[in-house]
Amino acid sequence: MADSHLDTVSSIDESQSEDSEIKRLQWAVEKLEELKDHLSKDVGTRILVEIFTSIIDSLVRDVCTDVHRDICFDVVPLCNEESQNLNRIVQAAGYDVHGQIPEKVPKSEFFNCDHCAQKIGAAKYAAHLAKCMGHGGRQRASRSAGTAPTESGSANTTSPSNLRNLSSPPANVGSSGNVSPVQAASRVT
């Protein structure tokens, strides 16, 4: 009988503590609703809250960016050794930057060029494709030097024939760009 009385007393205490907690939470919700109504009515307070929120967001963003940068550049060491080794670049011979052993491409492997359909070895495929599509080789060097290739394919503008063509105007144009006297006379007659 004493045990049942204790159980009843403890259940009453629990229900009273739950009721008091519920009343306390209801009171807190009412106060928050009042504060919300007050803040929504007061324009100055609302603007002040928006300003403080903006400042806090900016500060948090700055701190997060700084910490991220410091961790990426190993200025701040991470907590454990295992996580420190995650971002390391492996510089050992025979390994790629991630520490993996790269697959060997057999020398007998050939690819068909996408542009000209020629069979090219794997080691020279990229260079061939660049030349085949006009992005590599001597022509690119002459174009990047600022000279355009001529109709004959030569980009040399200092050849004797090019200099001769540049030094004298065409036969039908005078020095001032007008029609020559011979042409003018032939038009009159």
Image: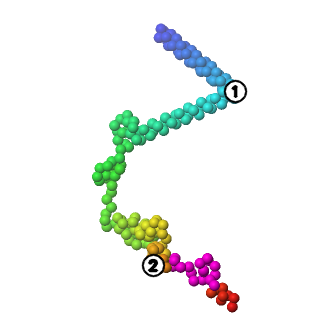
User: The disc labelled 1 sits on which kind of residue?
Assistant: Asp
Circle 1: element type: loop
Q: Residue at x 52, y 34 (%)?
A: 60
Which residue was labeled with disc 2? Answer: 160
Q: Quadrant of residue 33?
A: top right
Residue 42 - label: 1
Question: Is there a contact, CB below 8 Å, between mark 1 and mark 2?
Answer: no
Q: Is residue 147 left or right of residue 46?
A: left
Q: Quadrant of residue 119?
A: bottom left
Q: Tell me if residue 170 comes above or below residue 17 in the rendering.
A: below
Q: Depth check: 16 or 25 in front?
A: 25
Residue 43 percent across, percent down from the top left: 69, 29
> Which contiguous range is marked in magenta?
165-181
Residue 44 percent across, percent down from the top left: 68, 28
Residue 131 percent across, percent down from the top left: 42, 68
Q: Is residue 172 left or right of residue 5?
A: right
Whether residue 181 appears in this view of the structure is: yes
Whether residue 8 appears in this view of the structure is: no
